[in-house]
Image (cartoon, rainbow, N blue to C red):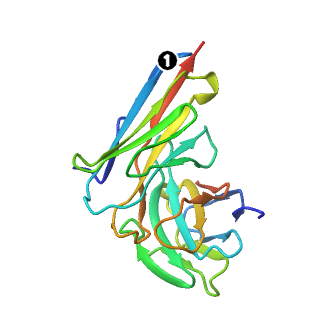
Amino acid sequence: RKEVEQDPGPFNVPEGATVAFNCTYSNSASQSFFWYRQDCRKEPKLLMSVYSSGNEDGRFTAQLNRASQYISLLIRDSKLSDSATYLCVVDLAGRSQGNLIFGKGTKLSVKP
Amino acid sequence: DTGVSQNPRHKITKRGQNVTFRCDPISEHNRLYWYRQTLGQGPEFLTYFQNEAQLEKSRLLSDRFSAERPKGSFSTLEIQRTEQGDSAMYLCASTPPGGGNSPLHFGNGTRLTVT
């Protein structure tokens, strides 16, 4: 299994659609998980942290499945402005050692 | 909070030359990270510092690459004898002190082109 793996997409969805991304990770000891958003030729920006119990921020919901070693991001009621690349980040060393590893990203394109 | 600052924004160099990039993290952020990103890929971890100590280096970081953070504040990343394969965006990020992993705050990056 690759260390942090994402479906590269692209995901092409109409406005208003619900879309979900998954990210698998290799180390069961990983403790910290994040989703970042990256616009073309810009730096990544934090979208949300992922907590064990799952968390929601407006139209965005993040979940963690430790048994299957993946995190997910659900976007409801997609907007044109949601078009971007979504990157998952995992502390692969576990125990919050600071080695934060990115997936390759999933590209989302929301169409009118 | 002025954010993470990276200089220069762009660097064009000829193969074989040395280049140095600078990163100024957010004040009082004790962890500082360097990543490299090429088109269509996620950021690849290179190294990170906690204060002035370099705690981890990726095996991607060949001996031509060296990073320093001498006083635990700003950091420099030097690439010696640049190769065309070094062309990429070099991203710096910092995180505040505290338990566990805090989210990364990125700078705008330095785009390196090796001709």
Left or right? Give the position of B28 relative to B34: right
Which residue does the image show at 53% across and 63% down from the upper left?
A: B102
Secondary structure found at label 1 = loop
Which residue does the image show at 46% across and 66% down from the upper left?
A: B46
Above or below, comparing residue B9 to residue A76 in the picture? below
Determine the residue located farthest toward the right in the rendered image: B2
Residue A68 point in image, percent of width and height: 22, 45
Q: B45 or B18: which is nearer to us?
A: B45
Is residue B68 among what the camera can see? yes
Residue B47 point in image, percent of width and height: 47, 70
Determine the residue located farthest toward the bottom in the rendered image: B71
Which residue does the image show at 44% across and 49% down from the upper left?
A: A50
Residue B30 point in image, percent of width and height: 59, 77
- The residue indicated by pointer 1 is A17
Left or right? Give the position of A100 relative to B87: left
Amino acid type indicated by mark 1: Ala
Residue B94 point in image, percent of width and height: 60, 67
